[in-house]
Amino acid sequence: MIEDMKSKILRLKKEKKAVILAHNYQIDEVQEIADYIGDSLALSKIAMNVKEDTIVFCGVKFMAETAKILAPDKKVLLPVAEAGCPMADMVTAENLRKTKKEYPEAVVVCYVNSSADVKAESDICCTSANALEVIKSIDSDKILFVPDRNLASYIKSQVKDKQIDMWQGFCIVHNRVSEDNLSYIKENYPVAPILVHPECRPEIIEHADFVGSTSEIIKKVKELKDKKIIIGTEEGILYTLKKQNPDKEFILLSNKLACVNMKKTTLQDVSNALENDINRIEIDETIREKAYNSLIRMISL
Ligand code: 13P
Ligand code: SF4
């Protein structure tokens, strides 16, 4: 049954001249049929350069929107329209416009986990993979960072010479990792390195051995000699980690590390999207151009 669905998707993909991009948090079956798997930064760069006419983006809405902003001539399909990111919804363009008035000198940096409208209101975008590089590249010492307060706090701990004011958004998944989870892990796996995503809370990040985007965590794991490794990010990352490192054991920092939105996309949804061109991403051209500027400023660094 699953194999039939996979064959159908591969056939449709050829027929429709489509490419399938999947984020590291997608369910295993979706990652298996993807042409490219990656973090937000890698997938946006890939979207810009693919030769196919259609991009099926298996991820959440802001990711598919980012692809459309960067590749406006492509047809971008999000298999499940309701696959959103609650953190991205914690800031709206209207709220941001109001808040900007309180910080007239600040450069507005938006995390890629934000809507196209918010990107359009921002000066430069960043992802978890390049946030420090982006902040350091800014020649003003006043920054307003939206929407993730945990990523902003992490940047603040690493870049001391800038005043960083932050929005109070957070990822409902990473923010769940608690100090109790950490104590349990430290007690039971005292020597295992802890690798976390910067969307975790500062109290957790402080005790981590490595902080990075999903793809950076995947890269770091390959380099480590340890046989037991603690992972502080969404559980979908285990697909690649286990595949690439069959000799290593991975322990999630918490048993609540599943993002329901990332798990909404099934093989059936990918097949429907391809077959019927559903959930096509469209962005108003004025918004797209502004959002493009903040993304391209990041990409050209
Ligand atoms: P990455 O950019 O690290 O893949 O993360 C995206 C995300 O949504 C994390 O929760
Ligand atoms: Fe959004 Fe968090 Fe899910 Fe990433 S893991 S898509 S930040 S809710």
Image (spheres, grey):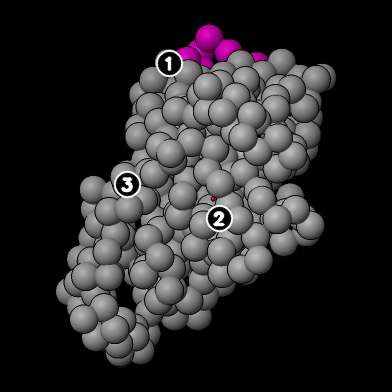
Q: Quadrant of residue 76?
A: bottom left
Q: Secondary structure at mark 3?
A: loop
Q: Which residue is disc 1 drawn over?
A: 98
What numbered label is drawn on residue 39? 2
Question: Of the residues under marks 3 and 1, which one precedes in the sequence?
Answer: 1
Q: Secondary structure at mark 1?
A: helix
Q: Distance between the Cα atoms at labels 2 and 1? A: 31 Å
Q: Distance between the Cα atoms at labels 3 and 1? A: 29 Å
Q: Position of residue 187 (x, y in %)?
A: 64, 29
Residue 149 visible in image: no
Q: Is mark 2 within 8 Å of ligand 1?
A: yes
Question: Of the residues under marks 2 and 3, which one precedes in the sequence?
Answer: 2
What numbered label is drawn on residue 261? 3
Q: Tell me the residue at 51%/13% (across/down).
A: 101
The region drawn magenta spans 99-106
Position of 76 relative to 66 (above/below): below
Decide if residue 47 is on the left or right side of residue 27: right
Q: Secondary structure at mark 2?
A: loop
Q: Identify which amino acid the numbered label 3 is placed on.
A: Asn
Q: Quadrant of residue 241?
A: bottom right
Q: Is mark 3 within 8 Å of ligand 2?
A: yes
